[in-house]
Amino acid sequence: MANMKDETHELATFLSQLTYEQLPQEVVDIAKASILNIIGCAIGSSDASPRLKAIAALLPDKVLENSSAAQAATIWGRPERTDVETATILNGIAATARDYDDTLLRTVIHPSCTAITAVLPWAEVHHLSGKELILGFVAAHITGSTGAFSAAGGIAKLLQLTPDQFAAALGHASSMASGTRAMFGTDTKTLHVGHHGRNGIVAGKLAKHNFGSCPAPIEAWARLVSTTVDTSLIGDLGRGGPWQILTNAFKPYPCGIVIHPLIDACLEVFGSFSVNGSVKDKEGPQDLNDLAEIHVTANPQLVRLCNVRHPRTGLETIFSLYHGCAVALVYGRATPAEFSDEVAANDPLVHSIRDRISVQTDSKLRDDEAYLTFTSSSRANSPQAHKTVYIKHATGSMQNPMTKAQLEEKFFSQTEKYLGKEKAIKVVETCKNLDSLEDVGDLAKLLATSQ
């Protein structure tokens, strides 16, 4: 073990020495888009139940009344300001509350929430530039195998730590990396992002003062959580290899990404339903009353992650493939409004559709791929009884990504209620020109509300 290659230190050395000028333009562009996306998700969940509970628990003793006070950070979508660590927790909870953020499909990890909710408040209170924020965010993505590593990497970069200090920060993060799938659908799940963001800040600050750690900490952590893990960390970094952030996929629907191909298929069928008795499709059910069954074939991850048949709350709907299908068929859309407490508990038609869904898995299918067969009750004995829809690549996947226009519409739909249209437009423009921003505090000011 004493002679074991320390890949954590190699990674830390690369990141410590990385400069903004080394970032390809496509990396800068997707970093800007990712930052905008997460800000929108957080502001859109300003009054989400977990966020309000956390504010009640954490904010009374942490509010900084003087908005110009040193170390005062913005709570996005709120008028209050607080210390950077508390702001990171509260912004992180909001950013992930509706699971509307982004995903690395290769790992089904949400890479940006913890990164930006840690580095943006830090950059704000330390009056760093937009370029410094982008660089810290990209560094956080590269280390983003879990939230604590992501935040620690981003803060370490903003602190300009040496390679040894950077590696120590990742070591501290390895002892603060936690979170379980058992918490899906609960308030605790939303805490993962804010908790890891705060831990990353602590890790970076300690490392700055030479608080030491062990060699190869990420490798040790990887062996702890899996017996069959590839501990190779650096790959082609620095040698023209792929940038992690370029595989980031933005989510068009506020639920587990493995549900997205199902929603696409159900929206397609919703569009084929008859209107006022006029038959639009010669196959399958003509409307919801004629829908006997939906049979889903998809990757095993779908059932592993999102198999809640009858969610009772909005938080639980995020992990329900049955709910995602049902609301797409009933409402013809899948926005945060359809993944709410009200729809989860009180829509009898949605409940009925959930019970008509059966699922089988096929490991040969990708996470963004699915077959759905819709069966008609009125055509039960006809060759036209069944309509099968195949989704090769779900909306929001790498092969079928959201457009810039769709991403901006997603942002506006979440933020105008809280910021107003004019301010929301300013946030979009500021993020587009983030590389020319002298003080990130100017962006953060736009994220606060007046009351």
Image: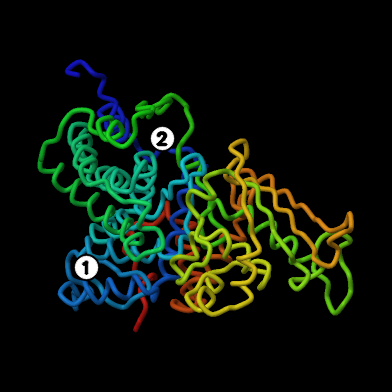
Q: Looking at the image, how many numbered discs can be counted on the residues? A: 2
SS at mark 1 in the image: loop
The residue nearer to you, when weighing 442 against 134, is 134
In the picture as drawn, the residue positioned furthest to the front comes out as: 381
Whichever of labels 2 and 1 marks the residue nearer the N terminus, that label is 2
Classify 404 as above or below 13. below
- Per the image, the residue denoted by label 1 is 72
How crowded pointer 2 is (Cα within 10 Å; few <14, some 14-19, many 20+) is rated as: few
Disc 2 from disc 1: Cα separation: 32 Å
Q: Which amino acid does label 2 sit on?
A: Gln
Give coordinates of residue 53: x percent, y percent: 29, 74
Q: Position of residue 159 (x, y in %)?
A: 22, 46
Q: As displayed, is residue 407 above or below residue 61?
A: above
| Rendered position, 58 above or below 238 | below
Asked whether the viewer can see residue 40, the reply is no
Q: In which quarter of the image is residue 184?
A: bottom left
Mark 1 residue type: Ala
Task: Indicate left or right for 22 with 347 as reference.
Answer: left
- The x, y position of residue 441, in whole percent, is 31, 63
Q: Which mark is residue 22?
A: 2
Front one among 126 and 38: 38
Residue 267, quarter of picture: bottom right
Tell me the quarter of the image containing the N terminus.
Answer: top left
